[in-house]
Image (cartoon, coloured by chain):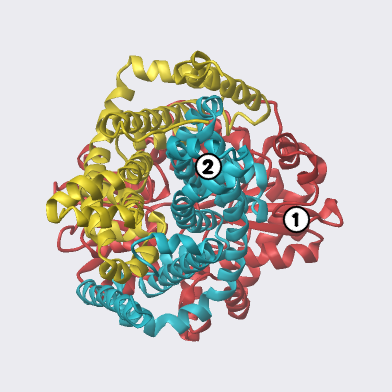
Chain colours: A cyan, B yellow, C red
Amino acid sequence: MSRGKAWALRLAGIAVFVLAWEIAGRIFGDALFAPFSAVIAGFPATVRDYHLFAELAGSLRQLLLGYLLGCIVGIVLGIMMGRSALLDGLLQPWVSMMFVTSIASLVPLFIITFGFGLMFRVAIVFMAAVWYVLLVTYHGARSVSPDLLQTARAFESSRVQTFFKVMLPALYPYILVGMRIGLAHAIRAMVIAEMYVIVGFGGVVYNAGVEISTVSLLGALLTIMLVGVALNEALKWFAQRTAPWYSERQQLSN
Amino acid sequence: MRASLTRPLVLYPVSIVLGLGVWEALARVIPKALFAPPSAVLGRLAAMTADGSLPAALLGSVQHMLVGYLLAVLLAIPVGIIVGRSTAIATAVEPILNAVYAIPPVAFAPFFVIWFGLYFEARVALVFAMCFFEILINVLQGVRNIDRGLLDAARSLDLTGFALYRKVVIPAASPFIFTGLRVGIGRAVNAMITAELFFSAVYLGQMLKTSSNAFDIASTFAVILVVSLFGLACQEAMRLAERFVIPWHHESTA
Amino acid sequence: MSTQKMTRRAAMRLIAGAPLAAGVGGFPAAAHAADTVKCINLGFVLGIHCPPTFGILDECPKLGLQVEMQRFQRMRDALQTVSGGTGDIGISEPIMLLHSRQAGNDIVIFGNHYLHTTLVVVVNADFVQNWKDLEKPDVTVGINSQGDITQVMTIGGFLKNGGDLAKVKWADVGGSGTRVRALLSKRVQATQVHFDQVPEIQKSGNYKVLLVPHKEYDPWVNEVVFARADWLKDPANRRKAVMFMKGIIIGSRKANADFAYYRNSFVKYATLKEKDTMPEAEMRAHWSALSREIGVWPADNGFRVSNLEKLLPYYRAAKAIDDKPIDLKAATDLTIVAQALKELG
């Protein structure tokens, strides 16, 4: 697909979304669900009054730290659990249980342990992202075809070679999905944790939510949406750079 | 590694016992106002099960969880397949998908109150919103991940339309679909409680709030434990289902 | 009763390893540990909070006390943070504090943050004309969460005007922004909002104010200052507590006397978007209402055990506290405010 066509399609999708927002907003009104036009019109004021971008920058720094940590641990553990029945049996119940625990319930305990500063926010983001990366990678590690592995063994490649040349490429799509889902949860956890202690960007969301008019709140949420898209694009770009052969294999190329 | 030692049946209990040990140790150091030892929690668990309050609450909570989850599955799988197969739609939809996915449900809850009210519909909607994307993203990836060669081969065999989907697309995407189902049900269990905490508190959520308000940490933990175990059980059920439905999908270990 | 005390650093040493415990965390290291205190406070700052906040953050340093303040969205988290040792002095609502005392949490209330509240009960006049109408089957009352000040405040008014509490339906809605939206979208027909939100609400339909707390209660206690009992036993900490209350009282007195002082504190600390653009006439009207009409910043802090005693029946009716007896004398410490007043004259 040509780049031009791709962009046209993206814009079309966005346009549909914005239109739906505008219509819904007009039906509900500012207090209940401000229309897109009102949110945009009020955005400069929102940015100014809540120091939106300054708070965002600070929050993103902590987000990236916690997220990267979560990815590394999640990928490593996921592969290890996927390939070792012992580790799998030992860790699986705890992973599955941690996975369904809501971040919100962990916040008070984390505050006691880590205070309210950098460590706390990094820890929350880590806890939110790691399970998704881990679980999806785990499933990927378990589904590497035994035929592939046997073939590699037949060619007398060492375990290390097998890992890098056979396993990792096979795991690649799973790791990508895991990282993508983990990223979304990392962003969400960041906002949740910050809403609790009313700092950073989450604090902005909280304070904006107190207002009767939803213009500021939706402005803040719109910002999160844009951040989500931007970070996802960054992730895709990074994926492209590290494994360009992958997109050729896919039906769709970006 | 001897197979008998690594069977889940053996390892899970070992893992849980080890975990309980750590928990008990922690409880000796952390103040009573915030934490409770396993003995107290298991005691409360037994009491709440015996008097029927816990089973009844679980049964109540499960209702909106199941409805929300099933709706999400029924929508995410077909949508994921259609979007995944069409480059055009995927490109158009992706920015919006990533954008909305980045927003935490916490921030959405006020709007859900307006759109869906405070009771069953709102809870179902929140459960849906909290697991839909995870399932969708996995299905999408599964469909996009299908080997081009496979599709070419299918085309050369004149497989089109419904037969193509039934014989090639869905089976090829199944591993990812099941990953999505498993991650999704974990999210749904999490959402089950979140929904009850956000809207009018009922069933398990109400038990959580009441014991939390009374600073009865043991009971609070007991409810959280039940939810975690329930989440574990659901995910194991998904794994079993996968083994049944796609037995050809080798999940091998080194 | 737990005699275990866990400072944040001890916890971290245990869980995260010694290296991490050094110099990491939310509060910056203080040069003189003797004159700093960590205060755990609640979420947003309205007009009513500004003078006491100014007193804590700006007047206390002049007295020799540096206050590091951390705000929390949920009162429960604020309480847990103080109980767990991460914070020293907390500001929260009295119902939850008393309830936690009943559960064995040894905290002590030693002063008011301010008196009364700016919350009022607003109803959709199409559905509710008087208190009795709250019993109607199609009427739901929105509150923040079961057993908290929003519910108790409403229950008090309802019971005073005669009614069957069992017939009233309650819905946990959450923060005031969400409660307003629930009211405007007709999901609830009555709820509690801040008095300055009322004009905006009334623009959207037929809404009226049913309860103004300072008229119904004498007085209504909304936010109090507390600390762990064992923290307060240390004479150095008592000194800090006295300075803390002096700061609040100075801020209160000055705000009562001088509108400019109030305006200054408002512009500096309020978390309202309109604070920079609010016309002076509107600000003055708020100040006048808060200071003169309602009297939210009493010159003597207005901290009396009898105030809580008078409210206990409503707490019990709302099942916000357990049926067990509660010893208010043990739950409160009047000496801190007494000392502060003595020193201030």
Going by the numbered disc 2, the residue's amino acid type is Leu
Residue B89 image offset from top left, x and y in percent: 26, 68
Quarter of the picture holding the N terminus of chain A: bottom left
Q: How many marks?
A: 2
Q: Which residue is painted at 80% across and 55% down in the image?
A: C29
Q: Nearer the viewer, residue A91 or B3?
A: B3
Residue B153 image offset from top left, x and y in percent: 26, 53
Secondary structure of the residue carrying numbered label 2: helix
Q: Which residue is painted at 59% across and 70% down in the image?
A: A57
Q: Is residue C83 above or below residue C205?
A: above
Quadrant hosting residue A59: bottom right
Q: Is residue A64 above or below residue C6?
A: below
Residue A158 image offset from top left, x and y in percent: 63, 39
Kindly tell me whether residue C105 is visible in this rendering: yes
Q: Is residue C87 left or right of residue B102?
A: right
Residue position for label 1: C243
Q: Nearer the viewer, residue A42 or B1?
A: B1
Instruction: State which chain disc 1 sits on.
Output: C
Are there few (<14), some (14-19), or many (20+) residues within 10 Å of tag 2? few
Q: Which residue is painted at 51% across and 26% down in the image?
A: A85
Tag of residue A106: 2
Q: Is residue B43 above or below residue A16?
A: above
Are there few (<14), some (14-19), or many (20+) residues within 10 Å of tag 1? many
Secondary structure of the residue carrying numbered label 1: helix
Instruction: State which chain disc 2 sits on.
Output: A
Going by the numbered disc 1, the residue's amino acid type is Met
Quarter of the picture holding the C terminus of chain A: bottom left
